[in-house]
């Protein structure tokens, strides 16, 4: 009787985890359509031209920072999966700091962009909404990472129960991958 109850509990937990994962992937798919629509509008409105005033060095630097944050996010998830709370917190905080640096870089880029290609220009019409939408996703990802870091510090996650960490890190990877598509669309295509 006890063995049967334990088996039912583990079966229900596995089923719940599958539902969570499916829900996250469907959400990410819907976000891909949103980014895809704006990226395709870039080519419709501005073709393949880009302003020469784009700060290529800054664009590359913030891209590298965001890619590095994906590594620390992965390390955070692995630490949570192995019950290593200290490494989980350390890597979560590193990811949050790197994400914050990315946002600082985007803010600097926006300051320069207003001067050279304002929002009413063809390129500005795409640049500001696309980078703004992505920045919104970065902010929401940072909030999510901060939330799981606080919960993790309080001992919320274990080797057998760390779905919130997994979900947050998968979302963060989506944010990074979205930028990997946005970066060449904005900075490299000409």
Image (spheres, rainbow, N blue to C red):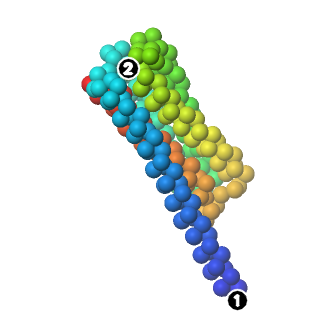
In the displayed structure image, the side of residue 48 where residue 168 appears, left or right = right
> Which residue is disc 2 drawn over?
122
Q: Is residue 54 left or right of residue 138?
A: left
Describe the element under mark 2 as helix, strand or loop.
helix
Res 124 visible? yes
Place of residue 71 in the rendered image (x, y in percent of width and height, measured from the top left): 46, 44
Locate the C terminus and report the quarter of the image it occupies. Answer: top left
> Mark 1 near mark 2, Cβ–Cβ under 8 Å?
no
Closer-to-camera residue (37/106)? 37
Quadrant housing residue 11 = bottom right
Q: How many marks?
A: 2
- Please tell me whether residue 178 is drawn above or below residue 106 in the rendered image: below
Split into 4 quadrants, where in the image is the N terminus? bottom right
The image quadrant that residue 10 belongs to is bottom right
- Across and down, in percent, residue 58 comes to 42, 22
The residue sitting at 42% across, 20% down in the picture is 124
Can residue 82 be seen in this snapshot? no
User: How busy is the neighbourhood of tag 1: few (under 14 within 10 Å), some, or many (20 plus)?
Assistant: few
Q: CA distance from mark 1 to mark 2?
A: 69 Å
The mark lying in front, picked from 1 and 2, is: 2
Residue at the extreme bottom: 1
Q: Is residue 185 above or below residue 55?
A: below
Residue at the image position 43 percent from the left and 44 percent from the top = 33
- Residue neighbourhood size for the residue with mark 2, other residues' Cα within 10 Å, grouped as few (<14), some (14–19), many (≥20): some
Q: Find numbered disc 1 in the image and state the secondary structure of the residue it sits on.
A: loop
Looking at the image, residue 148 sits to the left or right of residue 79; the answer is: right
Taking the spot 54% from the left edge, 24% from the top edge, the residue there is 104
Which residue lies at the image location 51% right of the left edge and 44% below the top edge?
172
Q: Position of residue 145 (x, y in %)?
A: 60, 44
Report x, y in % for residue 187.
35, 26
The image's mark for residue 1 is 1
């Amino acid at each position: 009787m006890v063995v049967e109850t334990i088996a039912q509990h583990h079966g229900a937990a596995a089923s719940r985890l599958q539902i969570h994962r499916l829900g996250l992937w469907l959400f990410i798919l819907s976000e891909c359509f949103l980014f895809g629509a704006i990226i395709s509008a870039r080519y419709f409105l501005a073709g393949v031209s880009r302003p020469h005033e784009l700060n290529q060095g800054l664009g590359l630097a913030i891209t590298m920072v965001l890619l590095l944050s994906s590594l620390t996010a992965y390390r955070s998830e692995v630490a949570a999966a192995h019950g290593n709370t200290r490494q989980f917190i350390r890597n979560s905080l590193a990811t949050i700091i790197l994400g914050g640096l990315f946002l600082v870089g985007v803010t600097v880029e926006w300051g320069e962009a207003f001067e050279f290609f304002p929002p009413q220009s063809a390129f500005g019409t795409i640049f500001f909404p696309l980078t703004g939408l992505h920045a919104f996703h970065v902010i929401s990802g940072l909030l999510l990472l901060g939330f799981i870091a606080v919960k993790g510090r309080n001992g919320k996650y274990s080797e057998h129960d760390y779905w919130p960490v997994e979900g947050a890190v998968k979302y963060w990877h989506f944010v990074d991958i979205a930028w990997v598509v946005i970066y060449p669309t904005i900075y490299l295509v000409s």
